Amino acid sequence: MSRSIVRQSKFRHVFGQAVKTEQGYDDIRVSKVTWDSSFCAVNPKFLAVIVESSGGGAFLVLPLSKTGRVDKSYPLVVGHSGPVLDIDWCPHDDNVLASCSEDCTAMVWQIPDHSLTRPLSDPIVVLEGHSKRVGIVSWHPTARNILLTAGSDNLVIIWNVGTGEPLLSMDDHPDLIYSISWNRNGSLFCTTCKDRRLRVCDPRKREVVAERLAPHEGIRPMRAIFTRDGNIFTTGFTRMSQRELGLWDPTNFEEPMALLELDTSNGVMLPYYDADANMVYLCGKGDSSVRYFEITEEPPYVHYLNTFSSKEPQRGMGFMPKRGVDVSKCEIARLYKLLDKKCEPITMTVPRKSDLFQDDLYPDTAGPEPPMEADEWLEGRDEDPILVSMRDGYVPPKSRELKVAKKNVLDSRPTTRRSMSTLETNSLPVSSLVYIMFPELLERLLEEIQNLKATVLSQEKRICDLENKLSQYTNGTD
């Protein structure tokens, strides 16, 4: 009898555990800006955290192996003139990161494999198109170099960061956009807005294909993410300010597939989705716990699994892509919890007795290779992510020397446009990496070389004049 009541699932016993103190990241001054973003982004190589900074916006980028105390003088990425609001790692290149800020710009950065030795202030490209602060950046899941930005001007812009040019824009939102999520193949994205509407947008047609008024009746901010089946998972508030989650079918927005009340709290629930396990991790800002749920194809569709609790409240959270987890320990997810002055990794594990690779826990997952280029996506092509096996674990590739292509900044070495023109003019074999690290020194050296060239030319002209006079004198004497 009990077997018919207990739901069968391999994820029923997932448990969370914080790593040891020495495996965390200490002395990080996490940003105190009042914006409901995660403040943290992570991939199999790096951890990035938005931090407090005087005189502009900055974020910290650490190799995952650099655990322990972070030196106060550790170099930051400091290109923005206003506070940084959101950051996102490129899914197709573990060394490329996008950021956006109150200075109305988004920037794309190339991070070297080694630790930074100087503050990084020269982005690969600056994206300028918003008239107010930019609060959301999100990479396309399957097309190379496609980046979405959304700002407080209620505008959504889709860029080709390889050329720095905007491809599409949408102005269908009458108020502030709270969140944006691409679907699995990047053909659609869903948004939540301050006007209390959930929208599904087709960016290439520049139209809203479906919308629902007040999926949650409260007026506080909502969040929405696409699941792998094309449904939409939402978090929000009831009229009585109780936190709530919902699951919706975008082809039929009349009634929710599932709607669950959670608790009473003010913190916005940030959902993180694992497409391989079809699980959602809910992290409330200001909470000290992480709830996780499994989504299934049969009613009631959303199943509560467990809660990981700790003592200190979280300021933000980072979610590791599946290719970055440790398969030898049956780890199915890893979250990076931001506290006031540190970052604490949390591992989510399925207990198994065998040390062998667990095929049922690790189906093939989305790899770093994009299935199509930006132009192909723009012309209407859709492709699912190219999958890779997790059997031998995932080893991040080294930062490869990128090919130079016309009008493609990301496929060239990480130099700014100014440095390229200077180096071409003077034909000097100077490494672009050195230029990024020592820009002022190289500018002075180039200036001195030009002055020396001018001096040499002047001296040569003087010598020629003297030789002519000497020749004339000699001829006159003869």
Image: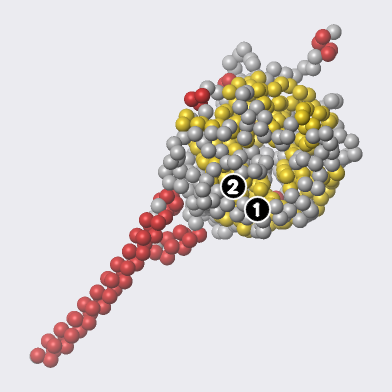
Please tell me in which quadrant of the rendered image residue 283 appears: top right
Image x and y of residue 415, in percent: 48, 54
Is there any visible trace of residue 462 in the rendered image? yes
Give the mark nearest the N terminus, 2 or 1: 2
- At x 50%, y 59%, the residue is 417
Element at label 2: strand
Element at label 1: loop
Image height check: is 244 above or below 5?
Answer: below
Image x and y of residue 344, in percent: 56, 29
Q: Quadrant of the C terminus?
A: bottom left
Judged left or right of residue 54, residue 35 is right
Residue behind mark 2: 84
Question: Hey, what amino acid is under mark 1?
Answer: Arg
Q: Nearer the viewer, residue 69 or 229?
A: 69
Please tell me in which quadrant of the rendered image residue 352 appears: top right
Q: How is the image coloured?
A: secondary structure
Judged left or right of residue 330, residue 79 is left
The residue sitting at the left extreme is: 478
Residue behind mark 1: 133
Please tell me in which quadrant of the rendered image residue 442 appears: bottom left
Image x and y of residue 113, in percent: 47, 40
- Circle 2: is it few (<14), some (14-19), or many (20+) Cα within 10 Å? many
- At x 74%, y 31%, the residue is 265
Image height check: is 440 above or below 214?
Answer: below
Marker disc for residue 80: none
Image height check: is 90 above or below 407?
Answer: above
- At x 79%, y 32%, the residue is 242
Q: From mark 2 to mark 1, how far is it between C-alphas?
A: 10 Å
- Circle 1: is it few (<14), some (14-19), or many (20+) Cα within 10 Å? many
Is there any visible trace of residue 359 in the rendered image? no
Question: Hey, what amino acid is under mark 2?
Answer: Val
